[in-house]
Image (cartoon, coloured by chain):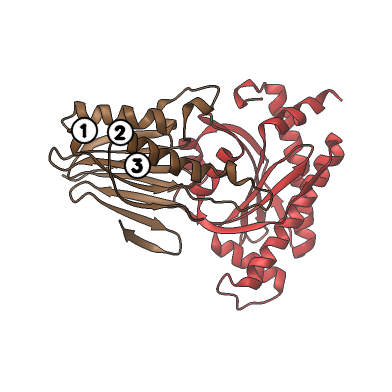
C-alpha cells in the first residue's frame, strides 16, 4: 500500500496502534528508570522531507539513533532518536553513574539495551492487538545527521514517494532531561498487513 | 554577492560562480556537482535512486540518477556551459544501517554510487574527486569559485575534495 491510499479510518487505526505500542514502551521505560515518563499524543502524519526537517529536526542536526529491525509478519524499522546530551542523561540514570561525559562502549550498550526494551514492549502490544507475530533484531547504534539517518531508513524500507508516513512517539522524562523520538517505519507490505487487521 | 543555494533531497539546482551550492544530510543518496570553469556555470544534484527503469512509478525526474543528470546537464548547457568542459565531483552513498540480514544487493547507497559513475562515464564527464561509501552521512558544500567541495561528517570535521 502506498501512503497516499490511506483513508482517515486508517489514520485513526494507526494512531490507536501507535498510542498502545508507545504507551507500553513508555511504561517499560518508566519502570526501568524508576522515573515518570510522559508520552506526547502520538502523531501519524504524511509529511514531505521539507516538512519533516522543518517540523521535527533539521537534516544536519547531530543525533544519536538506535535502530532495530522488526522481523516476522509485519517487518519494519524502529528508530529511537535523541540528542547526545539526552542520551548521556539516559545512560546516567540506567547505570547509576554521575560522571558520564562521553559515549563509551558501556554507555552505547546501555542505550542499546534500553531501546531493545522499549521496542520489545511496543512490539508486544502490537502482537497482542493485531494478532501478528513479530520479533526485533539486535539494536544498532549510530551518531550521525538526522537527515541522513531518516531518509536512508525510509528509502531502504522501499518508500520512494515524495511524502513519508511519520509514525512518531515522543517520550519526555519528568524533569525534561530526556526527550526521545521513536519512529516506526513498517515496510510497504507490513502497512497492508497492519491495515487489513482492522477487519479481524 | 555570494549566495548559498540549498538543494533538497530529490532535487537539483544550477547557478553561477561565486555562489555556493549546498546539500545537507546525504545518507544513501548521492550528491553530484558538475561545473564548467570557463563559463562559471555549475549544478548540484541530490539523487535518491539509481535507475528509473527499476521502479514502476516515476513521478519526479530529479529523484533518479539516470533522469536527473542528463536534465541538469542540458540546463547547464543552456545556461552557457560547454558539455566537453564539464567536470564532476561526487559524494554520498553511505550504508547507514548494517543489519545482519541485509542483502548486499539491496545496498541502495552502493547502487547509487555505481549508477552515478556509469551515467557520468556515458556522458563523458570526468569525475575529478569523490568521497563515497562508508557508514556516515555527509553534508556537501560546493564552492563554485574554486570548484572546491567541502564534506562535513559528524565526528570527522570538514575535508575538501
Give the image location of residue A119, x and y in percent. Answer: 74, 51
Q: Which residue is nearer to you in this view: A72 or A107?
A: A72
Q: Is residue B8 visible?
A: no
Mark closest to the chain's N terminus, 3 or 2 = 3
Residue under label 1: B83
Give the Cα distance between marks 1 and 3.
Answer: 16 Å
**Label 3: chain letter:** B
Residue B43 percent coordinates (x, y): 27, 37
Residue that mark 2 sits on:
B123
The label on residue B32 is 3
Which of the two labelled residues, at mark 1 and mark 3, occupies the earlier sequence position?
3
- The chain painted red is A
Q: Quadrant of the C terminus of chain A?
A: top right
Check contact, mark 2 vs mark 1: CB within 8 A.
yes
For this rendering, which residue is in front, B115 or B99?
B115
Residue A157 shows in the view: yes
Amino acid at each position: 500500500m502506498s501512503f497516499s491510499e490511506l483513508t482517515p479510518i486508517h489514520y485513526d487505526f494507526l494512531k490507536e496502534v501507535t498510542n498502545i505500542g508507545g504507551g507500553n514502551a513508555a511504561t517499560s521505560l518508566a519502570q526501568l528508570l524508576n522515573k515518570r515518563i510522559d508520552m506526547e499524543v502520538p502523531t501519524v502524519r504524511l509529511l514531505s522531507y521539507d516538512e519533516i526537517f522543518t517540523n521535527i529536526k533539521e537534516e544536519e542536526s547531530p543525533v544519536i539513533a538506535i535502530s532495530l529491525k522488526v522481523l516476522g509478519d509485519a517487518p519494519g524499522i524502529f528508530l529511537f532518536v535523541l540528542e547526545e546530551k539526552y542520551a548521556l542523561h539516559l545512560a546516567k540514570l540506567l547505570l547509576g553513574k554521575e560522571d558520564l561525559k562521553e559515549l563509551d562502549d558501556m554507555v552505547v550498550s546501555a542505550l542499546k539495551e534500553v531501546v531493545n526494551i522499549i521496542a520489545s514492549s511496543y512490539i508486544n502490544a502490537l502482537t497482542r492487538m493485531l494478532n501478528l507475530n513479530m520479533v526485533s533484531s539486535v539494536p544498532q547504534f549510530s551518531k550521525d545527521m538526522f537527515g541522513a539517518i531518516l531518509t536512508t531508513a525510509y528509502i531502504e524500507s522501499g518508500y520512494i514517494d515524495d511524502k513519508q508516513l511519520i509514525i512518531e512517539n515522543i517520550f519526555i522524562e519528568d524533569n525534561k532531561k530526556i526527550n526521545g523520538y521513536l519512529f516506526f517505519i513498517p515496510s510497504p507490505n507490513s502497512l497492508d498487513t497492519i491495515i487489513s487487521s482492522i477487519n479481524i | 554577492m555570494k549566495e548559498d543555494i540549498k538543494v533538497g533531497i530529490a532535487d537539483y539546482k544550477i547557478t553561477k560562480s561565486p555562489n555556493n551550492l549546498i546539500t545537507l544530510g546525504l545518507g544513501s543518496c548521492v550528491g553530484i556537482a558538475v561545473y564548467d570553469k570557463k563559463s562559471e556555470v555549475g549544478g548540484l544534484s541530490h539523487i535518491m535512486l539509481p535507475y528509473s527503469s527499476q521502479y514502476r512509478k516515476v513521478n519526479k525526474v530529479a529523484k533518479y540518477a539516470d533522469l536527473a543528470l542528463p536534465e541538469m546537464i542540458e540546463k547547464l548547457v543552456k545556461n552557457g556551459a560547454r558539455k566537453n568542459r564539464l567536470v564532476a565531483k561526487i559524494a554520498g552513498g553511505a550504508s547507514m544501517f548494517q543489519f545482519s540480514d541485509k542483502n548486499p544487493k539491496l545496498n541502495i547507497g552502493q547502487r547509487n554510487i555505481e549508477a552515478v559513475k556509469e551515467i557520468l562515464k556515458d556522458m563523458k564527464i570526468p569525475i575529478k574527486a569523490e568521497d563515497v561509501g562508508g557508514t556516515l552521512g555527509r553534508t556537501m558544500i560546493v564552492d563554485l569559485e574554486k570548484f572546491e567541495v567541502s564534506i562535513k561528517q559528524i565526528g570527522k570535521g570538514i575535508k575538501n575534495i
